[in-house]
Image (cartoon, grey):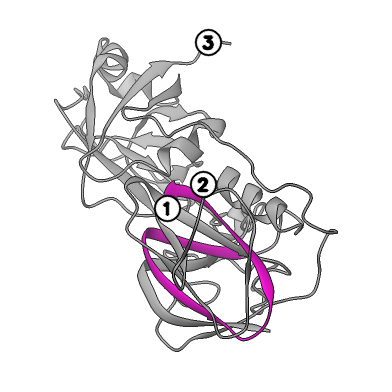
Amino acid sequence: MKLEVIRPGFAATVQDLGRPGLAAMGVGRSGAADRGALRLANRLVANPETHAALEVTLGGLVLRATGLTTVAVTGADCPITVGRRAFGLNAPFTLRAGEELTLGTAAVGLRCYVAVRGGIDVPPVLGSRATDTLGKLGPPPLSSGMQLPVGHDVAGFPAVDLAPRPALAVEPVLRVTAGPRMDWFAPDALATLVSTVYTVSPDSDRIGIRLTAAPLTRTRHDELPSEACVPGSLQVPPSGMPILFHADHPTTGGYPVIAVVAEEDLDVAAQVRPGQRVRFRAREW
C-alpha cells in the first residue's frame, strides 16, 4: 500500500512527534507544528500517536491510494473531497484503490494533518520520520510523483466516527512566562508585550513566527553570546519585533528572549496565518 502524491500543495512534509533529547548534539526536536492535531489524526485511524503523517500548509494536497485504507484529516478547516464525495474534519473515512483525496484551501487555520492507517513508513533518521526544514533531516518535502509507503503497525481498529474540536480562535491569546533576559529590556517591555496586538508576518515559517507591532524597547544593544533556546522562546532582535521560535527552531540563539510561550499553547500558535492578529498574556501559576 502506498500513497502517490499527485499535487503536493504548499510546504507539505512528513511529520511525527520529532526528535526530543538531541539538543546537546545541535539537533532540534522538529516534528508536527500542531502536535495535538497530529495525535488526534493518528488516534482516529487507530494508529499509535507517534506514527508519521502529512503536514500540509493551507491545503492544496492531492493524493492517490494504491489500495484500500482508512485516513483522517485534522487541523485547519479545509474542504476534503474524494471524487465527488465530501468529508469532514476529525473523522475517519475510507479511501479505495485508485481514488484521489483532495484538500482544498483552508478557510480557517494554517496547517492540516493527514493520517493514514499504518502510518507513513519512510525511513527514520535519528529515530524520527519528521522533516526538519532547518536541519535538513528526514524525508524531503513532498513533490509530485512521490510514492509514500504505508506501514502495517496499528493499535487496533478505529473506535469513533467523529471527534469534535472547538473552532480555532480568530484572535488567539498565547500565555507567556517572563524571562530569561528581562534585564536586556526597558522596565515596561513585558507590560507592552502583553498589552499589544501583534500581526503575523508573511515571513513566518516552521522555524519562527515573525510578529509586527510597536517595537519592544531594549536597553542593551551589545552582542549576546549564543545560548540554548526552547520551543516558544520569544527572541527580540534589534528591530524590537519579537520572533516566536516554533517547530524547527535552532537549538541556540543570539538575541535576548523576553518571554517563553507555554508549551500547551504552541499548537494554537501553529495555526495562526499571515496577517492574523495574536495577543499574549502573562501566565498564571
Label ID, residue 34: 2
- Among all residues in the image, which is located at the extreme right? 156
Question: In the image, what residue type sits under mark 1?
Answer: Arg
In what element is the residue under mark 3? loop
Q: Main secondary structure of the magenta part?
A: strand
In what element is the residue under mark 2? loop
**Which residue: 49% across, 37% down?**
266
Answer whether residue 71 is magenta in the image: yes
The image shows residue 214 at horizontal and vertical percentages of: 14, 25
How far is mark 3 from mark 2, CA to CA?
Answer: 23 Å
Q: Around disc 1, counting alpha carbons within 10 Å, would you say few (fewer than 14), some (14 to 19), or many (20 or more)?
A: many
Q: Nearer the viewer, mark 3 or mark 1?
A: 1
Residues at discs 1 and 2 in contact (Cβ within 8 Å): yes
Question: In the image, what residue type sits under mark 3?
Answer: Glu
Q: Split into 4 quadrants, where in the image is the C terminus?
A: top right
Q: In the figure, 100 relative to 226: above or below? A: below
The image shows residue 99 at horizontal and vertical percentages of: 54, 80
* Label 3 vs 2, first from the N-terminus: 2
Disc 3: which residue:
284
Q: Around disc 2, counting alpha carbons within 10 Å, would you say few (fewer than 14), some (14 to 19), or many (20 or more)?
A: many
* Label 3 vs 1, first from the N-terminus: 1
Residue 124 is drawn in which quadrant? bottom right
Q: In the figure, 257 relative to 5: above or below? A: above
Q: Split into 4 quadrants, where in the image is the N terminus?
A: bottom right
Per the rendered image, the range of residues in magenta is 53-77
Label ID, residue 194: none
**Which residue: 21% across, 44% down?**
201
- Among all residues in the image, which is located at the extreme bottom? 145
